[in-house]
Image (tube, grey):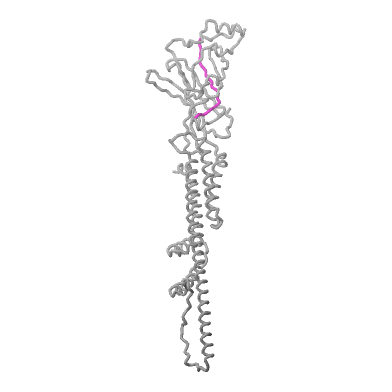
Amino acid sequence: MTIKLYRDLLRDYEPDVRPSIRHDMPINVTFTFTLTQLIDVDEKNQIITTNGWINQMWNDYKLIWDPREYDNITNIHIAYDKLWKPDIILYNNADSEYTKSILSTNLIVNYQGNVTWISAGIFKSSCPLDVRYYPFDSQNCYLKFASWAYDGTKIDILLNNNSGVQSYYITSTEWHLNLVEAEKQITFYSCCDEAYPYIDIMISIQRRPLFYIFNLILPCVLISIIALLGFYMPSDSGEKVTLGITSLLSTTVFLMLVAEGMPPTSEALPLIGIYYGVTIFIVSLATTMTVFTLNIHHNGFQGKEVPSYLQYIAFKILAPIMLLRVNKYHSVTHHVKWFYNKYKKEELLSESVPYLKPKRKVNVQHFTPSTNNEESFEDDFLSVLEKLHASMERNEFRLAEKDLRNTRQLEWQQVALVLDRFFLLLFMFGTIIISMAILFQRQIISLF
């Protein structure tokens, strides 16, 4: 009996002709879309791939029968190519093999002429992505379904209230599904006066950022910390600049990895790209300041004196603020400077090694000359004393000059140490504040 019903229904049936009682009467097609899986979001090509079910229902007056004449058969399945079907397709399709990706299932027809066509397919649709807050971004993608050949006077698409139900959705590990919402819209084209109805399926998704935090953001934070620890490294180690340059190269490599997955657009810079750019700038500036402090550290070997204003800034202002203890440079320095300047003015030393003149004349009248031997002995003795005195003062001057040079070196090294600690704290707090401001920019903006 089913075969008889099948043959009777398809006798003289034309699947290419719209089954309307009157040519000016539209066929109402009830449309339902159910999202089952979010397969992929291609940020570079701005394409979203979804898996879903499409349920279309309409009435075909040519497929009505009396169940009593066919052993109370109320439903029958007919191949999809045997009956007329509405040509509702995905307008913003981005797949060259769109027709092959949709499973062509049989149509279910009941005795009242109501036709139900449930098809499943994988849909690739274009979706303009806003990567401004990547990887903390949310995206709204739309699937536009409409009839390709018929306007609203021939096919009127009605929206089922069950569209957007998430009961059969398979959870994605990369994206969190916020909302699936369907809405009927009507548009007009310049070629025609008739209205063209269509269904907009809005899919709202939010990225799960844990993967990107662990693989992209955390390494960048650690590289920044290592680069800033170069200020804590002793200047005599000789690896401070090397550490900064290595950190700079590592950050650049991570930036290149991020750029490979981003769409080549100039409309908005991704948040993580801005973060990496700022990090590269901070690391570069920190490396430059490291070179500056190294130059200060080794400035004392040239015998230059630390300017008074630099001593005041380093030892009187910055050191107390950072609770940094430095040696009492002023007591030793002033004594060494006084001794060095005193004998420098008197020009005690020269290449010919002159002798010092006696500071007082010996009154020989108090001595009673006895013999010439005694006078000769006295002269020789005074000459030896003068030579001994000159030699002692020469040695003392050399020690004073050495102490002065060592003291100046110590002062320059202490200034470099204070500046290193200052730059360490400055860049550390600056990096934390800037990183928080960039990475939590969306949350900060939402507060206002």
Instruction: State whether residue 107 is above or below residue 447.
Output: above
Whether residue 447 appears in this view of the structure is yes
Q: Is the magenta stretch mostly helix, strand or loop?
A: strand
Q: Give the image location of residue 182, x and y in percent.
A: 49, 26
Q: Residue at x 57, y 32 (%)?
A: 172
Quarter of the figure that contains the C terminus: top left
* Residue 222 x %, y %: 56, 47
Residue placed at 55% from the left, 30% from the top? 40
- Does the magenta segment cover residue 193? no
- Which of 211/276 is in front? 276
- In front of the other: 286 or 447: 286
Looking at the image, which residue is at 52% across and 18% down? 57
Please identify the residue farthest to the front as the structure is shown. Answer: 372
User: Residue 97: percent from the left, percent from the top?
Assistant: 53, 21
User: Which image quadrant for residue 55?
Assistant: top right
Let me know if residue 53 is in the magenta part.
Answer: yes
Name which residue lies at 56% across and 26% down.
Answer: 51
Vertical arrangement, residue 363 with respect to residue 32, above or below: below
Residues rendered magenta in the picture: 46-61
